[in-house]
Image (cartoon, grey):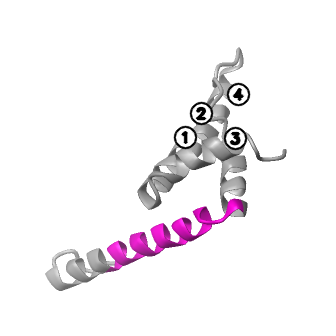
């Protein structure tokens, strides 16, 4: 986004673009979270990430793999909370009704 870090105008413009991108990403995620299908899909991803499971395994390479997957899930939770703080709680409550 910035070709010359000494150019204050470029830095300011890049900051504005980055802020717009963040807002768009949050709006997109919020849109998905407003649907039952979107919440089911994201809940399935979170479960696959193993955020509610231990990463322990006797094989350290398996632990590394599980922790990498779990870290992605934690990042997704943070993005969900940024976009719609009440969504995660709703997903947990509704997960009892999800099939599969």
Which dot marks residue 40? Answer: none
Mark 1 Cα-neighbour bin, 10 Å: few <14, some 14–19, many ≥20: some
The image quarter containing residue 46 is top right
Task: Where is residue 42? Give x, y as percent.
Answer: 66, 54
In primary-sequence order, the first of circles 1 and 3 is: 3
> Which residues are the magenta region?
17-36
Q: Is residue 21 magenta?
A: yes
The image quarter containing residue 37 is bottom right
Gap in angstroms between the C-alphas marked 4 and 2 = 8 Å
Task: Where is residue 12? Give x, y as percent.
Answer: 21, 79
Select label 3 or label 4 by which is in front: 3
In primary-sequence order, the first of circles 4 and 2 is: 4
Are the two marked residues, 1 and 2, in contact with CB atoms closer than 8 angstroms?
A: yes
Residue ID at (54%, 66%): 29
Select label 1 or label 3 by which is in front: 3
Q: Which residue is mark 3?
A: 47
Gap in angstroms between the C-alphas marked 1 and 3 = 12 Å
Which SS class for mark 1? helix
The residue lying furthest to the right in this view is: 100
Task: Where is residue 100? Give x, y as percent.
Answer: 84, 44
Gap in angstroms between the C-alphas marked 1 and 2 = 6 Å
Closer to the camera, 53 or 100? 100
In primary-sequence order, the first of circles 3 and 4 is: 3
Task: Where is residue 96? Give x, y as percent.
Answer: 73, 39
Residue ID at (69%, 40%): 47
Q: Which residue is mark 2?
A: 67
The residue lying furthest to the top in this view is: 58
Are the two marked residues, 1 and 3, in contact with CB atoms closer than 8 angstroms?
A: no
Which SS class for mark 2? helix
Which SS class for mark 4? helix
Gap in angstroms between the C-alphas marked 4 and 1 = 14 Å
């Amino acid at each position: 986004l910035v070709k010359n870090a000494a150019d204050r105008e470029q830095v300011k413009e890049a900051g504005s673009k980055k802020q717009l991108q963040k807002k768009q990403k949050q709006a997109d995620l919020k849109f998905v979270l407003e649907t039952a299908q979107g919440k089911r899909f994201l809940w399935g991803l979170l479960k696959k990430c193993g955020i509610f499971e231990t990463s322990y395994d006797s094989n350290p390479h398996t632990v590394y793999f599980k922790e990498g997957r779990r870290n992605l899930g934690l990042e997704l939770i943070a993005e969900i909370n940024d976009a719609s703080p009440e969504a995660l709680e709703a997903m947990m409550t509704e997960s009892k009704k999800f099939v599969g």
